[in-house]
Amino acid sequence: MLGRVKPLDAILATAEKKSLHRSLGAFQLTMLGVGAVIGTGIFVLTAEAAQKAGPGMMVSFIIAGFVCAVAALCYAEMASMVPVSGSAYTYSYAVMGELVAWMVGWALILEYAIAAGAVSVGWSGYMVGFVQNSLHITVPLEFVRGPFDGGIINLPAMAIAAAITGLLILGTKESATVNAILVAIKIAALTLFIALTIPMLKSGEFHPFAPLGFTGISGAAASIFFAYVGFDAVSTAAEETKNPQRNMPIGLIGSLAICTVFYMLVAAGVIGTVGAQPVFGPNHEVLSPGSAALSDACKAIGENAVVCSKEALAWTLRSVGYPLVGWLVGLAAILALPSVILMMMFGQTRIFFVMSRDGLLPEFFSKVHPRFHTPHVITLLTGVFVALFAAFFPVGLLADVSNSGTLFAFAAVSIAVLVLRRTDPNRARPFRTPAVMIVAPISILGCIYLFGSLSAATIQLFVGWAIVGLIFYFAYSRSRSHVGRGLVETHELDGDVPPSSVPPID
């Protein structure tokens, strides 16, 4: 019975029996979302987007942001209906069955854990650049880059991942408070960048606007999509949210709207001041971001291009005559990027927590610390894997692989909204996706489009990861599932789930 479904009422009942403490309000959720979204995508991957699309990366931001916006509307409906941990995994379990839910949860590992590793690598780049430019200390590349990026191990990236792991074990409310401070620093830095660069825009820097055509814009959109990843992590905090029916939609849509405005202005500031034309090879071939060929080309031109920078925004400010402000922005990135790592790891641990609570992962993963009231076992395990990802892989590869898992999960949630509208039309929906028959299909098609725009190697990695997930499910999870063992009331996919309203939450 691969189609066994855990009904929404059973999900809500399970969460009430073994739940996490509700301590987060609308403002904290919005700040968690902003903290998760604004990070490596804009501070670092702007350079990679420029190499793929040139000034056309502004269109790439619009495409990626639009796909996220329609997906956010679908997430908001599901999160307000099912205010428990688990995000897309939980929604899929209730609507499309256990096998789909498992594959979504498995894909979310790519989104959250690998994304946390990618941001750790981005933070390391700013930290190393800050030390070298401020203290004039030469840092051996062997210990700040992984083996796929010309080094041995990225020690700073490992260190920041370990520090965030410790913070998450201490407690959710404490983590959210620290996160709010870091978000304020991050927004202040980006506001200062915008204020200094927008008045200096030169129209000539926007030509040619799309040197690689729309194919380049699509490829950049698939990569820069990582800049928006994180708003859905807000939904993983539903079980720790006060009045989630009201606050979840505010946190999801509010954080995405704030971030989109900042992204467009920052991208315009980079392009209009220092330009964003790709660096080509000797035969005018396109050099892949992060490749050895691009690294050699950057050395030949003295790394005098934004596409060559590991710290794009700080480099831009130094190039236009604001070295002190560039130093401050670099410092802000060092202080603020950990908030993104925090939220990515937060989301990952909550996904694992719920999968363990459902029996699909070992039960000890869902143990809650008696003093800190956090899932400390799975938090520690997640931290170990994030540190390893950060130590050995480059930021571009990690970001693209993370995007593949995210797009899969977004499409699953959009499908779930459509299915549930048919199977359970009378269930209370505190937030309803507007024009759902238009919005949800657009979200699904947008996710497919961006997924297809990823590199062939990234798609192959995703397929391989999915195969490993299927093997694990049939070898372990299927036989230990609480639903499969009859510990939870189930319904078949071809039967309607009885309507009800979401029970009140104390």
Image (cartoon, rainbow, N blue to C red):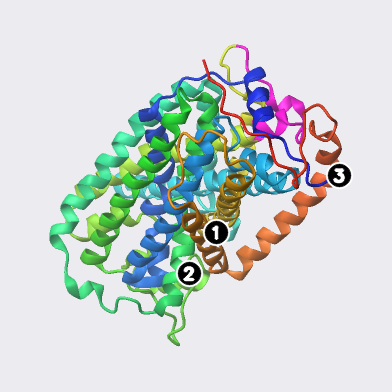
What's the magenta region?
A: 352-370
Mark 1 crowd level (few <14, some 14–19, many ≥20, 10 Å Cα): many
Task: Tell me the mark number nearer the camera, choosing from 2 and 1.
Answer: 1
**Residue that sits furthest to the bottom in the current view:** 283
Image mark for residue 219: 2
Viewer-closest of 472 and 342: 472
Choose the circle earlier in sequence order: 2 or 1: 2
Viewer-closest of 381 and 493: 493
Asked whether the residues under the numbered discs 1 and 3 touch, taking CB atoms below 8 Å apart as contact, a structural biologist would say: no
Compared to residue 444, the image places residue 179 above or below, namely above
Viewer-closest of 200 and 248: 248
**Residue that sits furthest to the left in the current view:** 199
Choose the circle earlier in sequence order: 1 or 3: 1
Residue that numbered label 1 is attached to: 444
User: Mark 1: which secondary structure?
Assistant: helix
Residue that numbered label 3 is attached to: 475
Identify the residue shown where x is 52% and y is 68%.
291
* Left or right: residue 305 compared with residue 140: left
**Residue 131 placed where, x, y %?**
36, 45
Residue type at mark 3: give it. Ala
Residue type at mark 1: give it. Ile
User: Mark 3: which secondary structure?
Assistant: helix
Residue type at mark 2: give it. Gly
Identify the residue shown where x is 58% and y is 17%.
373
